[in-house]
């Protein structure tokens, strides 16, 4: 079902006090809130956010996955979200039900045309993100995982200001060009007083399908070095696996978690343990 965001209420307009109360009430029912972020684009934030949501929900946790990348949402495609909101009883809007334990919200669920560009300035983005939290019935969750766009702009800032106890999970790739941007994410967290859950190094080496030897495509070990230097926890390294690209493109990340023999799954299991 398609719904339109018809208004672009800006913060400070209307009944903000009322909305704050709804946000507070909804968040009070959520255990851990994790913001997956990075200073760098394309390092695998959406994949990490979606995969962790899948793993945690498979392991019996109630999970919400919220995509606040409004200009370039990916969660809908990675998770093959075909339908819109779950409109139950009158007036109650629920996330798209991916499985019994996992609900998803992404802006793509309310866009008729997925290729349409979203041309919004800050106030509209702030308003949309706040509405995703205040106006949607998330219910009782063990984890709310939030997928952010790259950088330290409106979206992560709105999350930081709206979800005061959010924890940042920072994704990087091993090379310096990514690490230098990620250091800004760490500084962002320190400036807005957001707890840092840890750093994940993604795309850390490629296992040669012929000889099994590891090819350090983007280098290796940069994430752990940076985490040590900056005094934050290091959660793990995820290698490059072409099956991840294929599964993501087909919207079937779920199919991959059923293959325990994959090195990526061993890496993700460690990261999941670190988070729990
Ligand atoms: N470990 C991995 N091995 C192979 N491919 C991966 C891995 N992690 C992510 N990818 C692929 O890399 C691409 C970018 O991933 P993704 O969209 O998750 O990045 P992102 O950081 O969210 O990007 P953006 O900054 O645009 O939001 C996707 O095609 C995804 O399938
Ligand atoms: Mg993304």
Image: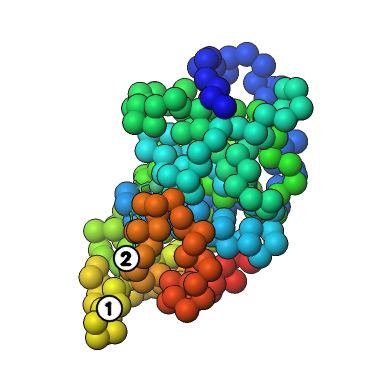
Is 175 or 107 nearer to us in this picture? 107
Crowd tier of the residue under label 2, counting other residues whose Cα lies within 10 Å: few below 14, some 14–19, many 20 or above: few
Q: Is residue 269 above or below residue 53?
A: below
Q: Which residue is identified by label 2?
A: 242
Quadrant location of the N terminus in the rendered image: top right
**Image spot of residue 88 (x, y percent):** 72, 30
Q: Position of residue 102 (x, y in %)?
A: 63, 50
**Which of 258 and 53 lies nearest the eye of the viewer?**
258
Estimate how packed mark 1 is, as few (under 14), some (14 to 19) or many (20 or more) residues with alpha carbons within 10 Å.
few
Give left or right: position of 101 versus 115. right
Measured as percent of width and height from the top left, residue 112 is found at 44, 25
Residues under numbered marks 2 and 1 in contact, where contact means CB atoms less than 8 Å apart: yes
Kindly indicate the quadrant of the structure image that contains residue 2: top right
Q: Along the horizontal axis of the image, is 138 left or right of 80?
A: right
At x 55% / y 22%, what residue is drawn? 3
Secondary structure beneath dot 1 equals loop
Q: How is the image coloured?
A: rainbow
Does the image show residue 208?
yes
Q: Is mark 2 within 8 Å of ligand 1?
A: yes
Question: Label 2 vs label 1: CA separation?
Answer: 10 Å
| Residue 53 location (% of width, % of height) | 57, 56
Q: Which residue is more in the foreground, 60 or 130?
A: 60
Q: Of the numbered discs in the image, which one, if any, rests on residue 233?
A: none
Q: Is residue 46 visible?
A: no
Q: Give the residue drawn at x 57%, y 50%.
A: 145
Query: What residue sits 43% from the left and 44% below the top?
Result: 77
Res 118 quadrant in image: top left
Q: Which residue is mark 1?
A: 209
**SS at circle 2:** helix
Which residue is more in the foreground, 96 or 274? 96
């Amino acid at each position: 079902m398609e719904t339109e965001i018809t208004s672009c209420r800006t913060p400070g307009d209307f009944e903000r006090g009322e909305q704050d109360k709804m946000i507070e009430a909804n968040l009070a029912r959520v255990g851990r809130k994790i913001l997956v972020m990075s200073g760098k684009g394309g390092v695998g934030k959406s994949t990490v956010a979606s995969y962790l949501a899948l793993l945690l929900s498979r392991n019996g946790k109630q999970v919400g996955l919220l995509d606040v990348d409004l200009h370039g949402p990916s969660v809908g495609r990675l998770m093959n979200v075909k339908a819109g909101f779950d409109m139950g009883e009158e007036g109650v809007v629920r996330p798209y039900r991916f499985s019994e334990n996992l609900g998803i919200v992404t802006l793509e669920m309310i866009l008729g045309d997925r290729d349409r560009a979203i041309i919004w300035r800050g106030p509209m983005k702030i308003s949309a993100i706040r509405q995703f939290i205040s106006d949607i019935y998330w219910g009782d969750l063990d984890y709310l995982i939030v997928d952010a766009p790259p950088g330290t702009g409106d979206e992560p800032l709105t999350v930081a200001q709206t979800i005061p106890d959010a924890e940042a999970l920072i994704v990087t790739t091993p090379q310096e060009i990514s690490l230098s941007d990620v250091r800004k994410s760490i500084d962002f967290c320190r400036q807005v007083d957001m707890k840092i859950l840890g750093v994940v190094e993604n795309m850390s080496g490629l296992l040669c399908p012929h000889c099994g030897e590891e090819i350090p495509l983007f280098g290796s070990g940069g994430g752990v070095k940076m985490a040590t230097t900056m005094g934050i926890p290091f959660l793990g390294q995820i290698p490059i696996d072409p099956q991840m690209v294929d599964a993501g493109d087909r919207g079937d990340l779920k199919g991959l978690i059923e293959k325990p023999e994959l090195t990526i799954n061993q890496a993700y299991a460690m990261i999941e343990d670190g988070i729990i």
